[in-house]
Image (cartoon, rainbow, N blue to C red):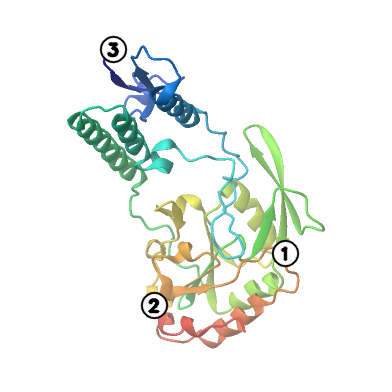
Amino acid sequence: MAAPTSLTLQQTAPAGRDFNSPRHAKQPAPMSFQTVVFSRKTTSHGPDGEITDAFKKKQRELEAPAPAPSPLASLVHQTDRHGKHLVDPKVRPSVQTAQGGGISKLFANICSALGLPEQQQQLQAQMLKKQQSQHEKQAETRQSIEVRKIMSTPFPGDEGKKCLVLDLDETLVHSSFKPIHNPDYIIPVEIEGHVHQVYVLKRPGVDEFMRALAEHYEIVVYTASLSKYADPLLDQLDIHKVIRFRLFREHCVHYEGSYVKDLSLIDRDITQSIIIDNSPMSYLFHPRNAIGCSSFIDDLDDRELDSISAFLTDIRHVDDVRNHLHKWSPN
């Protein structure tokens, strides 16, 4: 006769981290479920053995170390042709984030198959739910930001102008970490002690676009990319010296996994502020202030900036841009 079945759930810290050290004293230990012990005298053959083997296989998959994130992928905030943020395919989300209720469901299925009392299953489910809730609250606290103004008053000569906020990647330029034919710029960026080359292609018409609109608008570049890449790129892109402010990833609001450009932080009249961006998530907080352009990748026949420039020149004197931006069309 088989011995009684016992299910032991242990919470362990990831290898190499000591949560009692000063460095991690205020950081809650991420939860991972690494040890499930079945005390049985049955062999691995038969229904019970198959359940155990299946669980162990699933456990090994969950415990497999995730590939290290590519430092280059985190440098530039890139989107596809439809404006959707591109995520490094080598980066696997954490178990807590990707699985959601997967852990609790997995335990419930195992408990049910082994005939454990329903009361015990409910107790374990409640414990897991409580732990997940605590983890979510801690994540929200870490991601909260202090509301602050991120731009000073307009420069002399820009008083009375509307504020034009421009995205960088896939709006003004397209960057690649692989060599491309005839790039406009090659930006060296040092990451973790190694110098990487970023190959940049300008969107057709970008130089004239910024020169012409700077006569009527205060020009601001607001990118979700890191400054170590974007700053030297803008040094070369701004040939007419018309960009008044440069805002980077640290100036964005991290909301539901995306970087949002909050126009309420730039300290400009919202009725006089316009953002041009290929990613709808970027202007999620102010959709009526946005012109959603297409994503520029490599189309050298692209003329969308010319169309936007003509439209913005026409509406430069309107009282409230939010009543007019929906009229723009690339055709």
Q: Tell me whether the residue at label 2 lies in contact with that at label 1, contact meaning CB atoms closer than 8 angstroms.
A: no
What is the x, y in percent for residue 69?
Answer: 57, 38
Quadrant of the rendered image containing residue 268 = bottom left
Residue assigned mark 3: 3
Alpha carbon distance from label 2 to label 3: 74 Å
- 136 on left or right of 78: left
Residue assigned mark 2: 271
Sequence-first disc among 2 and 1: 2
Rendered image: mark on residue 298: 1
Residue at image point 78% right, 57% down: 183
Mark 2, residues whose alpha carbon is within 10 Å: few (<14), some, or many (≥20)? some
Type of amino acid under label 3: Ala
Quadrant of the rendered image containing residue 302 = bottom right
Alpha carbon distance from label 3 to label 1: 67 Å
Choose mark 2 or mark 1, whichever is in front.
1
Residue in front for this viewpoint, 182 or 68:
68
| Secondary structure state at the residue bearing disc 1 | loop
What is the x, y in percent for residue 141?
Answer: 30, 43
**Quadrant of the snapshot with the N terminus:** top left
Asked whether the viewer can see residue 14, the reply is no
- 5 on left or right of 261: left
Type of amino acid under label 1: Asp
Residue at image point 21% right, 34% down: 122
What is the x, y in percent for residue 254?
Answer: 41, 52
What is the x, y in percent for residue 110?
Answer: 34, 30
Residue in front for this viewpoint, 176 or 114:
114
Mark 3, residues whose alpha carbon is within 10 Å: few (<14), some, or many (≥20)? few
Choose mark 2 or mark 3, whichever is in front.
3
